[in-house]
Image (cartoon, rainbow, N blue to C red):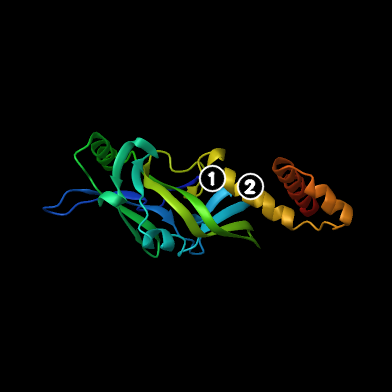
Amino acid sequence: MSTVERRFVATDNAVGIEERAGEPSKITGYASVFYDGSRGTEYELWEGVSERIDPKAFDRVLADGEDVAALFNHDPNQLLGRRSAGTLKLEVFSKGLRYTIPAEDTQASRDVLYNIRKGNLNGSSFSFTVAKERWDKTPTGEVRTIEEVGRLLDVGPVTHPAYSGTSTGVRSAGDIVEARSSYDAWKAAQVPVEITEERVEEVATLSPEEVLERLASYAKRAAELEA
């Protein structure tokens, strides 16, 4: 199973409140934004490496009706809604993946509404795994494109949307463990390795952990060659 990753958004309309006469307030926001050619719509993973979300990345998850939780700060104890209960609506627009959560009479919902109104909350986030991805080299750096999300676990407002100077990004190294592993494997695959009978026999004796270490060394070599 893929490692769970998280991305954070702090663009305009990342989180807000929808209010209509005669209807309960709704917590709304964009859990993810799609790349539109601008810097603010790609996620900065680390220096020189960014990530883009394909507009079709969530299509399968939404079509299959998979259950998704709406959480505040990814905390299961701060439950705001759930797709299977009809208290979380997910929609894809040209900008990205939008969520709508009817504000229930719970402490978590009341706290979120209060803090949005006060301007204390200005970001959204989502937790996910990757089913399909692509790595490319571009004039501005190396890019990971997520073409299909494997699982969408939760969406919702967050207190600290991103630490970088861009409007989208990651909050801690733990959020990009899977991306880093994928990147290292991609870099390793670009290093020419002479295939000999002796090398094949050598690799066959390696444990899975040793294979990963070997791939990491190849990635390091590739980086040194490019430097």
> Between 21 and 207, which is closer to the camera in this rendering?
207
Horizontal relation, residue 67 to residue 188: left or right: left
In the rendering, at what x and y percent does residue 45 appear? 57, 48
Residue that badge 1 annotates: 3
Q: Mark 2: which amino acid?
A: Ser
Label 1 crowd bin: few (<14), some (14–19), many (20+), radius 10 Å? few
Residue that badge 2 annotates: 181
Q: Mark 1: which amino acid?
A: Thr
Tell me if residue 57 comes above or below residue 7 in the rendering.
Answer: below
> Between 155 and 93, which is closer to the camera in this rendering?
155
Q: Secondary structure at mark 2?
A: helix
In the rendering, at what x and y percent does residue 41 appear? 48, 57
User: Residue at left 29%, top 42%?
Assistant: 80
> Between 151 and 187, which is closer to the camera in this rendering?
151
Q: Secondary structure at mark 1?
A: loop
Tell me if residue 164 comes above or below residue 140 in the rendering.
Answer: above
Counting residues from the start of the chain, the first of labels 1 and 2 encountered is 1
- The reply to whether the C-beta atoms of the residues labelled 1 and 2 are less than 8 Å apart is yes
In the rendering, at what x and y percent does residue 17 appear? 26, 49
- Residue 212 visible, this orientation: yes
Residues at marks 1 and 2, CA–CA distance in whole angstroms: 10 Å
User: Residue at left 40%, top 40%?
Assistant: 74
